[in-house]
Amino acid sequence: MPKNNGKNAHAKKTGNGTLRELFSYIRKYWLLLACTVLLSLATVVCTLYVPVLIGDGIDCIVGAGRVDFQTLQGILWQIALFAVGAALTQWLAGLYNNYITYQVVEDVRAKAIRKLQVLPLKYIDGRGYGQTVNTVISDVEQFADGLLMGFTQLFTGVITILGTVAFMFFVHWQLALTVLLVTPLSLFTAKFISSKTYSMFLQQSKIRGKQTAFIDEMLSALPTVQAYTHEDENLQTFDAMNQELEKCSLKAIFFSSLTNPCTRFVNAVVYALVALFGALAVISTGGMFSVGALSKFLAYATQYTKPFNEITGVVTEFQNALACASRVFEFLSAEEEVSDAQNPRLPPVEGNVRLENVSFSYEPEQKLIQGLNLAVQSGKRIAIVGPTGCGKTTLINLFMRFYDVTEGAIFVEDTDVRTVTRHSLRTGYGMVLQDTWLKSGTIRENLCLGMPHATDEQIIAAAKSAHAHGFISRLPEGYNTYIGEDGGALSQGQKQLLCIARIMLLLPPMLILDEATSSIDTRTELKIQEAFARLMQGRTSFIVAHRLSTIQNADLILVMKDGNVVEQGTHAQLLNGDTFYSKLYNSQFE
Amino acid sequence: MKQVLSYLKFYRKQVVLAPLFKLLEALLELAVPLVVAAIVDKGIPSGDKGYILAMFFLLFGLGLVGLLSSVTAQYFAARAAVGHSTRLRRSLFEKMQSLSFAEVDKLGAANMISRMTGDVNQVQTGVNMVLRLFLRSPFIVFGAVIMAFFVDVPSGMVFAVALPVLTLIVVGIMAITLPLYKRSQEKLDGLLLSTRENLTGARVLRAFCKEGAEIAAFDRKNVEYTKRRNFVGSISAAMNPLTYAVVNAAIIALLYVGGIRVDSGLLTQGQVLALYNYMSQILIELIKLANLIVTITKSIASAHRIEEVFSLSNPLKTSADATVYTDNAVDFQNVCLSYAGGGNALENITFSVKKGQTVGIIGGTGSGKTSLVRLISHFYDPTEGTVLVNGVNVQAQNTQILREKVATVLQKSVLFEGTVRENIRWGNPAATDEQILHAVALAQATDVVNSKGGLDGKIEQKGANLSGGQKQRLSIARALVKNPEILILDDSSSALDYATDAALRKALATLPKTTTFIVSQRTASLQHADIIVVLDEGKMVGLGTHAQLLNSCEVYREIYQSQFKEVHHAQE
């Protein structure tokens, strides 16, 4: 449990807050919840009362000629009534409980997906995707399951135990005491075994992890393994781990499987004790404590231990669920982007962009862009170059308002971009990133991402100008081919062509091309460049490129280094003399 | 299933003994209600405390022997299950290592790993549970019914009616809900995909203002998922109440029939109590049995997934024709290659390479360059035509020996956890440090080795502590230490700068006996080759030297010009 220790202090502090937030989701369903509680209560009362009735029934059947049929008949009707009552209330309680749980899950997820859209990219970039997916999918599920299902289980469990104990004391307190004292033994045994086996399981999962890492390493490098005929050596390494795993697993599995036989044995002992003392009590009270009462005790003794096992399970689940819930609520309460709902829309733009004294940094301590000034007239081509990590991509983040400037302002058509809606700003830009991203769906769906109602002719024309039509037509179902998550089986170059075609369809007034042709072979690239040149005609374009050959025709080249624009000018101007640009330019051919 | 289960034959003793001991335990449990009945019928009326005490010890003894036999059974079951999965895992790993690229690509590495781990574990649990419970639970259920008949035939009839009804409810509800659960799980996967895409594609989706559309799509899936779960939940929530009701109905019948039989002296009060206890036992075991069936179903599904891997045959063809046709190093004769379901990856490739020559292979992305060189080491079979190495059809050569002659440096160089020395020795396990250092020097990797602290320097899994260029140079060293007859560099200098690339080519030229294949997208990397193969969408569109191709091959000229421009400008 060392996992929990670190978070315990934190969990305690926020525990109340978590519960309060949780109630805010459940409040909507309070009526149903109240019904569930009442129904569960009714179930418990009925199930506890049925063995009593059965015991009374057995008391009516004493011996030959001594059967009280009249009373028995009444009792049998009562058993039927309570059994049906128990079944019905249990079913309804289950239905309502499911409904509330699933509905809360749905509500939380619906809120989460909306949250995702307004979270700053800083949050999304800074946290592993897997972690967030895990929060939205499994944490939500687990906390709802754990808290709501757990709640009813805990509730009915506790009531059952209390009811059983009370009843046993009421009927025969000495016998009740016996049950009460011996039963915990089975819990201790279970606990003892699980604490002993815990380290064995830990050991097992450690070796398993080692083995999985080895399998992963070798299987994902299978071409290399086979090329170097290294299979036999691998098998030897594998065998060594495998044998170690066998030893550990055997121990862990065997010892943990002792729990059931041991608890069963303790229960058998309780049962035997109840039979013994119960029978003695029947004799000593001269039938005051009847055989029927003995039967009730025997029934209770077996039924009494069950909720205990369930409750211990529920408690661990509960802790886990609380941890999940606090992660979910932490995610839901993360700081959002500055709202732009009140802002006006940016009217259609021509493409005049101005940066005034712009400073930006991802982390306050780490200055990135400082005091950047730039004025770009409509229709100009601006190239941004520089070594890795110099802030090229950051600039794009600022243009698109994925991030907001820390100081200064960016203007489009003399309007501060922070005073208009993000949507209206982004509609003005067409963006192709190095990091190609495609949606799972058909090729067509991907191409008309920005223009849902595009006609086939428009789509094909766009694909043709991006040189993507050729390979699309060769796919099994052409434009209707379904591609999986992140492009599925398409090659990196093909994905990039699709991203370019996506923009060719839109023809926005401003373009952002971030290493847009990096994965395309030089011959195809040359052809796309022509298409790009046509596309850029009359449009303001920002081009980030690694291959400097692609940007020589730019109207202005910004050379960036450590967040600053160190040089600017045309290709010819910049190559003149001992510039950083000329160094950069020549280094690729050395 | 056959192969998966075959490993149980090593554990015959355990497989037989585990259930037998479980059976013994069940038998003892079935005796308990009879002992209680004896207490009620004999001990209590006669007031014989000694008898009651004796019966108590009998109950205690039954529990103790039950415990011992159960522990024995658990041990045998665990032994058999764990041993079985250990052997299964081993042969699965052996099988996976022998698969061809095509099959591995089809299955995917992640998928194979999950079969190796998750599925094998599931089979282990299945075997364990079957050995432990598969005899016990049915035995107690049917045993209780038989015991009831043994106590009293008319009361036994109540059991005979109740049991099928209970079974029908349990099996019926599971049969209905299992597929429904599976389908609602698929819906959940849809939600997961949506969430992932909203994260990975946040920039693109926002750039295209798709936030609203994404929310709407997610909401649709979300509501659908809830609907499905509520539906299946309402069915499975009925299982416990229904079985409870049926068992109690049976108890009512028992008390009624018992009342009549006792009144006429055919049955005793204690026996009615015993019958009631049997009925309670049935319900508990029936539920266990239902859960067991779920586990078994899952295990069988896992076993099928594992079996699928075993049934993949390595489809490499062999040929008996060991004739030496030419004295060339490599010949391609009308070679075509197509992958399952796809179009032609290579079409009618014919060329010959003399021993010691350097061959350049060039073409755009997806033109078939890698497929071509993989044919040399017989990683694939050509669909048509023949590939000869040293004049002999590769299909007639022992794959292991063939691959020892050929050293391939892959596009994605993979290094492994361990020292630098261990990694380079993959090429030649017997290599001395001197030989290793020589290979390192040829591969221009001396500075890489030094930066890691010599040959004992540590390399992390997948070479994570090395840059792309460093990895490439070390894997070239690994190939060179083999002293190969044929060296294949599959786009393996792409992460090297021009200067290192040039130095490497110069060093390789000092190996006169080695036939070298250089696959590249850069004309500069292979313009000095003796012969250059130009590929375009699987077809060979040019064959000759750099100078010849510039004259005769348009594709080559275009590639050259697209890159030459850069160089040309640089030299301005």
Image (spheres, rainbow, N blue to C red):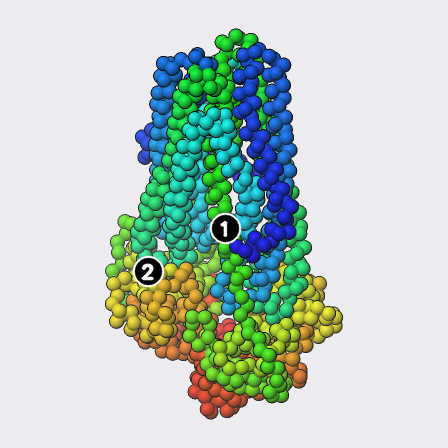
Cα distance in 3D space between marks 1 and 2: 46 Å
Q: The disc labelled 1 sits on which kind of residue?
A: Ile
What residue is rendered at 49% in x and 34% in y?
Answer: B141
Question: Contact (CB < 8 A) between labels 1 and 2?
Answer: no
Q: Which residue is mark 2?
A: B208
Numbered mark located on residue B300 in the image: 1
Decide if residue B133 is on the left or right side of residue A440. right
Quarter where residue A456 is shown = bottom left
Left or right: residue B402 versus residue A380 is: right
* Front-most of residues B219 and A360: B219
**Crowding at label 2, few (<14), some or many (≥20) Cα neighbours within 10 Å?**
many
Which numbered circle lies on residue B353?
none
Query: Is residue B563 among what the camera can see?
Result: no
Note whether B134 is above or below A529 in the view shown.
above
Is any part of residue B142 visible from this angle? yes
Image point (62%, 82%), residue name: B322
The chain letter under disc 2 is B
Say which amino acid is labelled 2: Phe
| Horizontal side of residue A266 vs A110, given as left or right | right
Which sits in the foreground, A418 or B487?
B487
Q: On screen, A142 above or below A296?
A: below
Q: Under tag 2, what secondary structure?
A: loop
- Give x and y (percent) for residue B133: 54, 39
Q: Is residue A486 left or right of residue B512?
A: left
Decide which of B277, A16 is in the foreground and name it. Answer: B277
**Chain letter, disc 1 residue:** B
Q: Are marks 1 and 2 on the same chain?
A: yes
Q: Position of residue B473 (x, y in %)?
A: 62, 71
| Image quadrant occupied by the N terminus of chain A | top right
